[in-house]
Amino acid sequence: MRESSSRILEAVSHVLERYMQSLRAVQEDIIERNNVNVFGSGEKVLMLAHGFGCDQRMWRFVTPELAKRYTLVLFDYVGSGNSDLSSFSIDRYSSLHGYAQDVVDIIDTLELTNVAFVGHSVSSMIGLIASLDRPETITELVMVCPSPCFLNDLPDYEGGFERNDLDELIQLMDKNYIGWADYLAPLVMGASASTQLVGEISGSFCSTDPVVAKTFAKATFFSDHRDLLPQCTARTLILQAASDALAAVKVGEHIKKHIAKSELEVIQAEGHCLHMTNPDVTTNSITTFIG
Amino acid sequence: MSSNATQANSPACGFLKLDKDRKVISCCQYGLDLLAYDSLENVKGLYFSNLVSLASRIFVDSYTYPMLIADGKADEIQLSFKTFSGDTIPVVANAQMYADSTTAWTFMSCVNRNELYNELLTARDTLQTQALNLSQLNDQIQERQSDLQAFCHSLSHDFTGPLRRINQMIDFALEDFHAEGISAPEPFKLLNNAQKNATTLLGMTNSLVEYLVADVPVPHDEIVDFSEVIADVQAMCDREGASITISNRSSVPRFSGSKGQIQVLFKNIIENAVKYNDNDPVITISHTVDAANDLLVIAIEDNGIGMTNDSLDTIFTPFTRLNCASTYTGSGLGLSIVKKMVNNHKGEIQVESTPGNGSTFYVSFPYKADVDK
């Protein structure tokens, strides 16, 4: 009797061991897939999420200071930076929910708790979507130059852009990629392959695969997630530049109005990358807010 | 000297300097002209974002400035400038950022380059659509091919099996009649007729399979030894009592193709030559190499009944029977199979014929001398 129960135990532990192995493999996949980097120290976890255009290296001017107080989790969305391009799919990443799933995957894999999510630009909304999925985990949101909708919806809402402007943006991206990337590669490899890989692209850290970038651009600039703002329960800090051609202060005010526990801080600066152009002010605002 | 100085003052490209807040500090005359501003004073202090289109603003904020901050420079950026009067002008720009976060921009108008890019993008989009359509068509073809293969399989097994068994049953019945000493001519005649019809149906089914199988892709890169093909066909002719002559047999070159299909192709032509013949069949096969056009032309001449010019147009159409079915049996598929197989080899087939004086079929295949080595 004892012998058989020990045999059962052995079998169960064997199954568990295999399960753990496959779980570890999935976890390693996510870490590699999203090029996740964890450093710094502190109880509080700060997830720093890059916006449309570049990758996690955009945070490098604020990370030295933040790492002294917090555990930092940096990552690249699938398709950006040094993520695994082969994991990209147009279906998944045509909406911000696909990117939010990347965030949730990382939270689950690292078993993170007590997370403040700091998102730049479109990542502010991606963070908000992720926070609706994991409200217990993501307790604070810091939105750096956010916009829930770039399109005008006059007279009630001024996103700043008409559809024509954004169509022109997609064209402009195309024209710039001709000079940057292995532009015709996806075509040469066939329509189906273009959703998968595109290999190394030389040049600056901002140059990326055209198919990926345009998918991200469309998900970013053609989406409207204003309806999600009132659902947000996380404490939220909105950092807006006084002069930002992409996200005007008015947009920040709209967000503040619709998120219950939110505060808006307007920083006297020009541009859409406060964390790069004004790293000290940005760092101070984040630490003051999070504590 | 003075003319050089003038040229240096108005180069054919623009220069713009921005302070760390991206406000214009200076702009050269080319830039002012391009942007349609009267004087530097009117541009000074303007934000760069006011000098470009809305789309360019997003691009500059999402890509160019991050690149400048990270790498110090950004090259060959396509942007659209917005002029004082509200027009947009495509420009290509190089930008540099200095330690004090000021930036220097050189740029030039690129209307033609922009047009070229637009054309390139349109061509790319068209190609992408076509590639997608092609791949969908290809999927459909693959599906049909596999349906066709399944159908041929069914035809050659499920149809011909029962037909053979009918023939066999009739044979048994005839044997039984003989064994029991029944020799009434009438039942025999009916049974013989039934058997003849079953045999015709069997022949037609086999031809139909051949006709359909001709569409199933097969490798066309085998080296075909034509004299081997003819030897097999000759064996068939011997059985049927036809005389076949091959001129300069030893020099018939080898060429690349599908052995199986080439064999069926010549078998069908020669079968026809024997079948539609009221004399003792005499068939002559000869060949020529048309080096100028990289062609091997094989001519098959017979002494058969021949055809009228009108008939020549229809002989390759499936189920075409030119002659009385009771005199000449056949499925009406033989030459259409030949035509398909010739097409499969990117070849051509032509016929010359005179009623009562026989026909000559010319089959040509693409042929490169180096295959025959």
Image: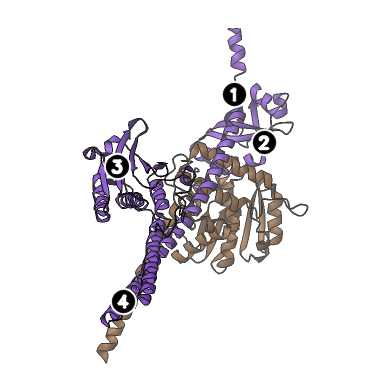
Say which of A84 and B6 sits in front. Answer: A84
Classify mark 1: helix, strand or loop: loop
**Same chain for the residues at labels 2 and 3, yes or no?**
yes
| Residue pictured at 60% horizontal, 21% vertical | B12
- In the rendered view, would you say B223 is above or below B291? below
Q: Which residue is mark 4?
A: B174
**Same chain for the residues at labels 2 and 1, yes or no?**
yes
Q: Which mark is residue B47?
A: 2
**Same chain for the residues at labels 3 and 1, yes or no?**
yes
Q: Are marks 4 and 3 in contact (CB under 8 Å)?
A: no
Q: Quadrant of the C terminus of chain B?
A: top left
Q: Which residue is mark 3?
A: B285
Q: Label 2: few (<14), some or many (≥20) within 10 Å?
A: some
Q: Alpha-carbon distance for marks 1 and 4?
A: 103 Å
Classify mark 3: helix, strand or loop: strand
Q: Which chain is purple?
A: B
Q: Colour of chain A?
A: brown
Q: Label 1: few (<14), some or many (≥20) within 10 Å?
A: some
Q: Which residue is mark 1?
A: B13
Q: How is the image coloured?
A: by chain
Say which of B111 and B223 sits in front. Answer: B223
Residue type indicated by callout 3: Ile
Single out the mark in the foreground, 1 or 4.
4
Say which of B105 and B82 sits in front. Answer: B82
| Residue pictured at 26% horizontal, 48% vertical | B243
Q: Earlier in the sequence, mark 1 or mark 4?
A: 1
Q: Alpha-carbon distance for marks 2 and 1?
A: 21 Å
